[in-house]
Amino acid sequence: MKTPTYKSIYLYLTHDCDSWCSFCYRKGLYKRNNIKDLGDFYMSKETALKTLDFVFSKLQLTSTFNIYFWGGEPFLNFEVMKTVIDCYPQFHYHTNTNGKSITKEIYNYLDEHKNFRITWSLGNAYEKYGGIKQKVEAEYWAHKVISENDNSGANLMVTKYKNLVKDFEFVINNITPNITIDLATRYNHTDEDLNKFAEQYFCLMTKYMNKGDKYEALNPAFSNNLWHNEFGFKSLKKSWKFCRSGLERLFIDTMGGIWQCDNMYICQHNKLGDIYTGIDYSKLDLMWKIAENTDKYMSQYCEGCECYGNCPRNKCLGLDLEHMRNMFRPEPAYCNMCKIIYRISKKYVEYEKQKRIGVRND
C-alpha cells in the first residue's frame, strides 16, 4: 500500500456564506445532503488545531507544504483562521473569498502577515451589486487588501459576456494585474454567450501578451499541448491531466473528516478517514492507478471530441461523479467550457505563429 506525500491541505472552515451566489458549485452539497447531517456549521479552533497536529505527526509532507482555508466563505470563521496562522506562522496560506466579510480588523491583521495569498472572486458583482465597480466600492476592505498585496489577485468569473473587456480593464487599472478569467460551472452558458466570451477573451490575450510576463496567467494557451507542440517544451506535454486528488492534497471538513477533495466531500464519496482514527490508504488505490496510467483512465468517453488529447483542463472527477454518477464521463457544461478554452488557445497559437513568421520575414 502506497503512502502519499502531501503538498497541501484544505481546511473547510464553514458551510456558511454571506452571498449564496446562484451559480456556486457548492450548492451541490446542500442539494445532495441534509446540512444538519454534515456536522458543525463552523470548524472549531479545537478541531483546526487537532487537524494540524494530525497532519504534522501522521502525514508525509513536502518541503513546500502550505495550507488553504476553504468554505463557504472562509472569512466568516476568521477567528479560527487567525488561530491557525498565529500557531504556525512559518507556512504559506491561501484562500478564496467573495470579499464581503473582510473588515478593517481583518485588513489590519492581513497587512501584518504577508505569508497569506488571497483570490478575490468577482463573479457575483452583477448578481449582488449591479457591476464590478459597484462591488469594489461596496467591499472597500477587500479592495484594499488585494490592491496592496502583490501576492494576491482576483478572479473574474464571467456571467455578463458583453462586459468582459471593460470589466477586465477596470480590474487591472483599479485593483490588480494578477487576474484570471473563468466561467462558472453552474451557469447556463448559451452558444451565443460562449462565442462572445471567446471573441473578447482572445482580444484581451492579443493585447496584454505584449505587456510583459505579469499577464501570463491570463493566457490558457501556455499550458496547452498546442502551444508546446509549436513553441514550448515537449517534456511538458501531457495528453491527459490528472489533479492527483488525494495523492498531493487533502480536504478536511468541519468535523475533522478527511476526503481526497472538496468535490468528493460534496458527493460524500470515498471518505478516507478522520483526524482521530487516521486514513485508510487503501481507499486511494484507484487514484494511484489513474496517476500511473492517466491516458487509459482519463481518455474514457472522450473519443471524437475536437480537443481529444489537448483538453485544456481535462476532467474533474468529483464534478463528473456529482452530475454524471461516473468519475470519467464528462459533465456537459464543464466540457463545453473546456472546448471554448481550447478554441481560444488554438486561435492564439495560430496568431502567435503568424506573428513570428512576420517578424522573421521583416
Image: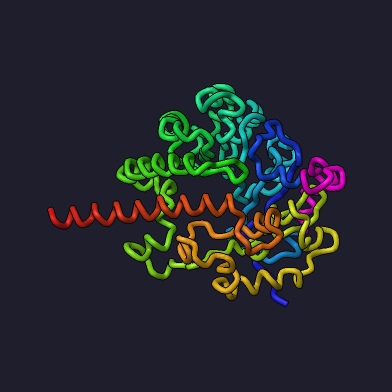
Q: Nearer the viewer, residue 247 or 21?
A: 21
* Residue 180, visible in the rendered structure: no
x, y (%) of residue 195? 44, 43
Magenta-highlighted residues: 31-54
* Residue 277, visible in the rendered structure: yes
Tell me which corner region of the image, top left, top right, bottom left or bottom right, holds residue 31.
top right
Q: Residue at x 49, y 44 (%)?
A: 191
Q: Residue furthest bottom?
A: 1
Q: Is residue 53 magenta?
A: yes
Q: Residue at x 65, y 72 (%)?
A: 288
In the rendered picture of this protein, how many numbered marks are placed on residues? Answer: 0
x, y (%) of residue 278? 81, 64
Horizontal side of 129 relative to 70 (left or right) equals left
Q: Nearer the viewer, residue 26 or 288?
A: 26
Q: Residue at x 65, y 67 (%)?
A: 5
Horizontal side of 41 relative to 296 (left or right) equals right
x, y (%) of residue 187? 60, 41
* Principal secondary structure, stretch drawn in magenta: helix
Q: Is residue 265 magenta?
A: no
Horizontal side of 67 relative to 160 (left or right) equals right
Above or below 311: residue 199: above
Q: Residue at x 45, y 31 (%)?
A: 163
